[in-house]
Image: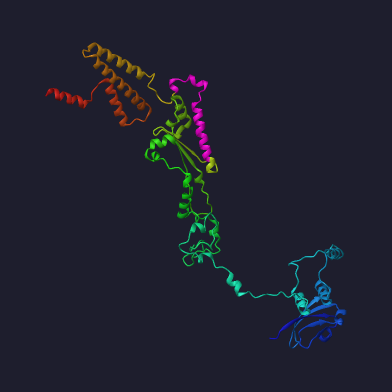
Amino acid sequence: SGCFVDAFFLFSETLPRQSEVLGASEGGGSYQLNAAAENSLEEMIILRNCASCGVVRTATFRRCESTLAEKMLRAAEGVELTETEAEQRERLEVELDEKGEPFRELFVMPRRKLNAQLQLERLTGRAKVIPFSRMDINDRLAVRRPRYEEMRTDQDWPSVWPVAASFRSSVVPLPIRMGSRPHPEKRPPFQKLGNLELVKIPNFLHLTPAAIERHCNAIKKFCTPWPAELNESKETRLRHFPVTVSYSDYVHQGTSLRDPRARIITITVKLASLKLNEAAREKFMRLAGNRYDEATDTLTIVTDRCYTRKQNRDYAFYLLTALYHESIKTEAWEKMVQRADHLKVKFDGSSTQRSVQEIVERLTAEEKATLQDSTTTSTGRNVSRNENVQKFEEMWQKYRNEVETPESVRRYDECVRNLLGIPRLEDSSILEDHRNK
């Protein structure tokens, strides 16, 4: 169990004695190469012997003409091992390999000194000693603890985290964990210290209720109060703000913060708020197609073909503007429109209108022939008959242009009876019973 020291020997055809090769001090601390060994240099051998007893334990042979042997010789002579770029270039141009091509050095590892060379420099006293100073206890005490360990429970958090920033574990005093590990029932997720998953995702630590309230109070002086009439009356709100824009935001856990559904824009507007005439309204309905709901008189435009929400919003308003201007525009060929080209059946110009006019004129003539009352009573009957004609006209258009339902049939029957003056069956039976009594 002695201390072994690496010694370098020069080996000739007949191995010289150790005393001839090395001049060792009595203490066995250092070794020096003598001149005889240097003159008979042919082969190099590395012996590993014990420093106390001098017994050779291992031996390694090397070619004396190798680069390592030359470096050892130059190190023993005290010659500087470094060479300039010009010397290195000249040496490489002279040296040729076995095929006669220029020798190109191959450095498998970085160009640094070998362990044997470092050992030789330490033995000869040419090695540079790097001093290592011990760390001062005051320097260690000067290192501050994490900030979250010094925070109070009643501190002003908006001052600690005023704006949006990446997660910092040294500031947040919360035992947050995030990540996935095998066997989660046995091992909890990773802690917040050095957790990159917490840094990747956005946080809302700057949008606490206290921070939002403080921000609202700061900009409150620049705002005007919300009109109470808009909350009380829906008609007033639709009259001043006819266009409604709707979109959705999605928050979920995943690898990406973006959701393709968040770019969808929906615009709704009442067609009556556009103040179109009859021809423009019909043209608008034809251009809108199934986007217009006649039951609610609402136009709905949904855009999702663009990549961003702003692009879809601009595209939706462009469509609404194009529909409006194309509707109010009148082309020359539109003057040749006929009754069969209309989108809905109209009462004006129909055969029903002519029949109603004939019936009304006949009833008026019969009343004049048999009339014995005053002129005031006749005028009142004419006014009531005109009101019945208007109600019949409205009900006839709804009955012809909308889906037929039992309720629409009942109302149409009632309008026809009022126009012709025919009482209901139950009313007539009640009248006969009253006369019989």
Expressed as whole percent of the image width and height from the top left, the position of residue 370 reads 22, 12
The answer to whether residue 6 shows anywhere in this view is yes
Tell me the quadrant of the picture where the C terminus can be found: top left
Q: Is 352 contained in the magenta span?
A: no
Residue 344 in the figure: left or right of residue 118: left
Considering the whole magenta stretch, tell me its main secondary structure.
helix
Residue 55 in the figure: left or right of residue 199: right
Residue 82 in the figure: left or right of residue 331: right
Q: Is residue 266 above or below residue 284?
A: below
Instruction: Write down the region rendered in magenta.
Output: 312-341
Q: Is residue 145 above or below residue 36?
A: above
Q: Nearer the viewer, residue 366 or 19?
A: 366
Q: Nearer the viewer, residue 224 or 99?
A: 224
Q: Quadrant of residue 233?
A: top left
Q: Is 331 contained in the magenta span?
A: yes
The answer to whether residue 305 shows anywhere in this view is no
Farthest left residue? 437
Expressed as whole percent of the image width and height from the top left, the position of residue 413 reads 29, 26
Q: Is residue 325 above or below residue 264?
A: above
Q: Is residue 175 above or below residue 430?
A: below
Q: Quadrant of residue 402?
A: top left
Expressed as whole percent of the image width and height from the top left, the position of residue 321 reads 51, 32
Residue 139 in the figure: left or right of residue 246: right
